[in-house]
Amino acid sequence: MLKGKGYFLKQLTAQTRIRSVDVGREMEGSTPPSVFIGSWNYPKVYAGPMMAAEHEATEIYDSPEEWVPGGYEQDEIINYRVNLVRGKRELDVTDVEDRLAVKLQETALSKRSSMGEVKFRNQPRGLRLSDEHTPHGPSAFLEEYRVEEGSWDRDLEKAYYDTDLKAKEAILDLHRRETHFSKMQKALSVGAFGLKRNRRMVPTRWSITACDSTIGNHLLEEVRQNDILDCYRVYGHQSLNNSYQVILLPTAWQYEWTESFIKVLGGRTHTFGDHETNLGKRGYSCVGGCYYSCKMAVLEQLHREKIQAGAIILREAYPGYVPLGVFNVRENVRAAVKGKPTEHNTLIEALDQALGKLTLPIETYERESLLLRENLHNVQTSLSMFT
């Protein structure tokens, strides 16, 4: 392992060459709507809107739920994102009634894209890539931000005005109403949810994992009450230079995520993984937010079908892969488990099916896994008892 996944991704993003959009100190354009709350120097954070120099609807620029089902190519998504220019100003996370914070709440709760104007202190520079959140284009300190008033998403608006509703309950209610994940995440990040006295801004990357884990943990409580799946299932999906294989096991809940980056950084393969048993997981995952995005997507499907199962997910990323954020995992796994699975009587058959769609041998995944090894060991032990 190359000093952990975090170090690997820093090296990968450092060598990725993408040209950012060039804009001046003043800009007119459209916000999808989009906001970004940084995490550096928390609880003093850099918060602000993101806007594209476009005089047309830009919702697709910040709608990751549409990209995988819509078959958008990686270059299209990158083009949307690098055209979003970020303005920023330092705010304390508790300053949710600050003038800029209120403007950001209005932006995040908007039903559709809105026209606006921004004035920067200096010319926006740079480009931000991350495996946690979607990329964005250049950024600069904000002097002015004006945006036209638009209608709010009704469900988000209801949660905003209910100052006696806890943030957790707001997220779960919005998920039940099938609100787009990105919409509820942005609203949480600007401090639009929760008890009035507790409201605060949440850094974008933290708000994504907060929504994933809140929904996932709630679904798991209900899934644990369901009957266990009666066979092995394999689901698969490929897009954005990735391949995903989801194996469901006829067991009580257990979960393992393993991902391999094949010649994405140099000529080597780098594999990372994490897991939880039926007892759950303590601490934050060593592989980052993708662990929770995948878990939530799998539990959504188990909850829909009213079944319980174990889950082993294998992911491969291929040359040309660019970190686009954990939506890549969430939406690809969602797409996989909504498809028609193959059904198998044994784990060996299920693994043969899954590995037939991947490029690496089983030994690569076994070295990084625990649950896969244990389940294979149990199968081999059982077989030896009858030979």
Image: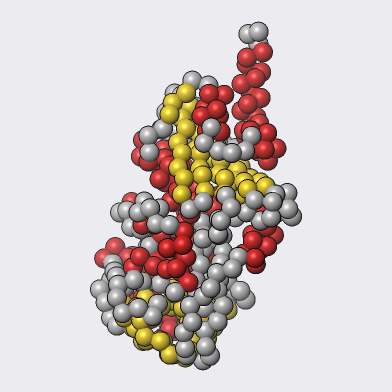
Q: Nearer the viewer, residue 181 or 128?
A: 128
Measuring from the top left, give residue 130's x and y in whole percent: 56, 64
Q: Residue at x 53, y 73 (%)?
A: 19
> Which quadrant would residue 315 be assigned to in this image?
top right
Can you say which quadrant of the picture contains the C terminus? Answer: top right
**Residue 64 visible, this angle:** yes
In this picture, residue 379 sits left or right of residue 174: right
Question: Residue 160 in the image: x percent, y percent?
Answer: 34, 69
Q: Residue 237: horizontal and vertical position, in percent?
A: 45, 42
Q: Is residue 48 above or below residue 119?
A: above
One can see residue 183 in this view = no
Given residues 342 and 300, the one toward you in this image is: 342
Above or below: residue 307 compared with residue 95: above
Identify the residue at image location x=66%, y=18%. 381
Q: How is the image coloured?
A: secondary structure
Q: Position of residue 100 (x, y in %)?
A: 43, 84
Residue drawn 60% across the image and 65% down it: 16
Q: Residue furthest top?
A: 387
Residue at position x 36%, y 85% in the image? 28
Figure quadrant of residue 32 = bottom left
